[in-house]
Image (cartoon, helix red, strand yellow):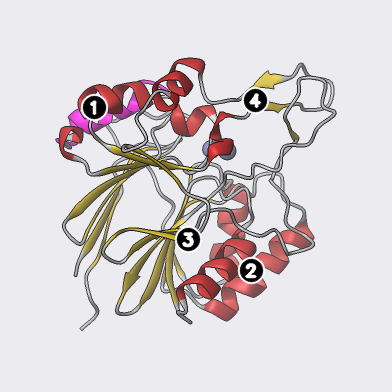
Amino acid sequence: MTTVLKIIVDNHAAKGLAAEHGLSMLIESGGRRILFDAGQGDALENNSRQLGLDLKHIDALVLSHGHYDHTGAVDFVMQENPEVQVYAHPAIFSERYSIYPGKDAKDISMPSEERLIVGNLPDSQLNWVKAPTQIAPGVWLTGPIPRLHPLEDTGGPFFEDPEGQIPDPIADDMAMWIETKAGLVVVCGCCHSGIINTLGHILAASGSSRIRGIIGGLHLRNSSDERLHATVDVLRAYAPEFMVPCHCTGTLATDFFKQNLKTEIHPGYAGFELKTGEPS
Ligand SMILES: [Zn+2]
Ligand SMILES: [Zn+2]
């Protein structure tokens, strides 16, 4: 079974495509077409047209978590395909702010229009994911990821109130994994649970012992050196064949991976395509 992953929206883009701070990927696997996240603004509509990708015929829309840069174009997706099955965790509707020292609180919640659209979907179309769930042959969502590693945090000054009193655990954060003969391909949105926690949870839930590849945002922009070293140690032990860090991973972390891992590292961008055919 060949799986094809295409990045449609990312902070970086191939020539002729729009870049924006956001993420959206199309995954075709086992005869199913899954849109993983919906970017922030117009890039999803623009780039899917430029790339000749028809979102009218997708089977599932997965929202990795309820931040504005992953949910902004849900209205476009639902216009294209009003029947699409939606998968998310109920905490996507949380109020959320990022508050950097000396700066005003920034509202980074899922936009209100998108919240209304998802909130009004019938039960038959809205699938709350609270545990590992298979959504297509060989394609699974993690559900909430236990936060076990002492050095991993959500990756930023995230709060549920504009005063910064209530830390936001981003409990809705989830990843996806795809089974291939050579191991699991892991797809992350922002990875607010931390990649060490995410991979540990996926291996435990899947019963697999092999991570073949990782694609997506790893939110290591604000990471301590200590955490980066711990991350590299764990990745070295798992020895994935490839990694496609993109979106919020940060160039510092990406360069650190390149310097310290034998894994093939391909920084992702809108227009990037990955085929995971079976190895010969
Ligand atoms: Zn993000
Ligand atoms: Zn996020």
Residue 77's place in the image compared with 210, above or below, is: above
Q: Is residue 245 left or right of residue 225?
A: left
Q: Position of residue 262 (x, y in %)?
A: 50, 75
On residue 245, which mark appears?
A: none
Q: Main secondary structure of the magenta part?
A: helix
**Pointer 1 local density, CA inside 10 Å: few below 14, some 14–19, many at least 20:** few
Read off the residue under disc 3: 132
Tell me if residue 209 is in the magenta stretch: no
Q: Is mark 4 within 8 Å of ligand 2?
A: no
Q: Is residue 208 left or right of residue 252?
A: left
Amino acid type assigned to the residue bearing label 4 in the image: Glu
Amino acid type assigned to the residue bearing label 2 in the image: Val
Read off the residue under disc 2: 232
Q: CA distance from mark 2 to mark 3?
A: 26 Å
Of label 2 and label 3, which has the lower sequence position? 3
The magenta stretch spans which residues? Answer: 41-52
Residue 161's place in the image compared with 176, above or below, is: above
Between 85 and 158, the one nearer to me in the picture: 85
Between 6 and 158, the one nearer to me in the picture: 158
Of label 4 and label 2, which has the lower sequence position? 4
Read off the residue under disc 1: 82
Q: CA distance from mark 4 to mark 1?
A: 26 Å
Q: Residue at x 77, y 53 (%)?
A: 224
Between 115 and 271, the one nearer to me in the picture: 115
Q: Label 3: state its secondary structure.
A: loop
Read off the residue under disc 4: 95
Mark 3 vs mark 4, foreground winner is 3
Q: Label 1: state its secondary structure.
A: loop
Amino acid type assigned to the residue bearing label 3 in the image: Pro
